[in-house]
Amino acid sequence: MFFALLTERDKYMLPCVNKRLFGFDCPGCGMQRAMSLLVEGNFAEAFHMYPAIYNLILLAGYFVLRAFVKIRYDNWILRVLIFSAIALIIGNYILKLIN
């Protein structure tokens, strides 16, 4: 059933320009599907689709929070969230290229 939903979902998603032009995934490939899976409540499948999705949601939430609240150690927290998101994205991309 999951794969039937995946094909229906793919009809409405933006295509990856990098994949279309060069034939291989970009570092952001899978993010749209992961967000769609999160909305549907498939949390584990969303993580398998794009492992950095939860970190990116935390980062976006932190940006919203810091707009309204002064946070102690703001720069340190922001650096940790950004560097961990970058590490997850690059690590996932390298694993996709290897496999």
Image (cartoon, rainbow, N blue to C red):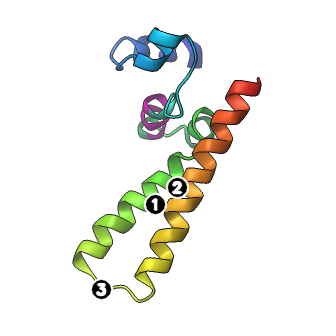
Cα separation between marks 1 and 2: 5 Å
Which residue does the numbered mark 3 point to in the structure image? 70
- Identify the residue at horizontal 68%, vertical 28% (top origin): 96
Can you say whether 13 is above or below 21 in the image? below
Please report whichever mark, 3 or 1, sits nearer to the chain's N-terminal start.
1
Residue nearer the viewer, 75 or 63: 75
Q: Which region shows up in magenta?
A: 32-38
> To which quarter of the image does residue 42 belong?
top right
Q: How many neighbours does mark 1 have within 10 angstroms: few (below 14), some (14-19), or many (20 or more)?
A: some
Task: Tell me the quadrant of the picture where the N terminus can be found.
Answer: top right
**x then y, percent, for residue 39:** 41, 39
Cα separation between marks 3 and 1: 17 Å
Q: Which amino acid lies under the numbered mark 3 shown in the image of this protein?
A: Lys
> Is 10 left or right of 96, judged from the image as shown?
left
Residue nearer the viewer, 68 or 4: 68
Residue nearer the viewer, 8 or 66: 66
Q: Which amino acid lies under the numbered mark 1 shown in the image of this protein?
A: Leu
> To which quarter of the image does residue 91 belong?
top right
Number of numbered discs overlaid on the protein picture: 3
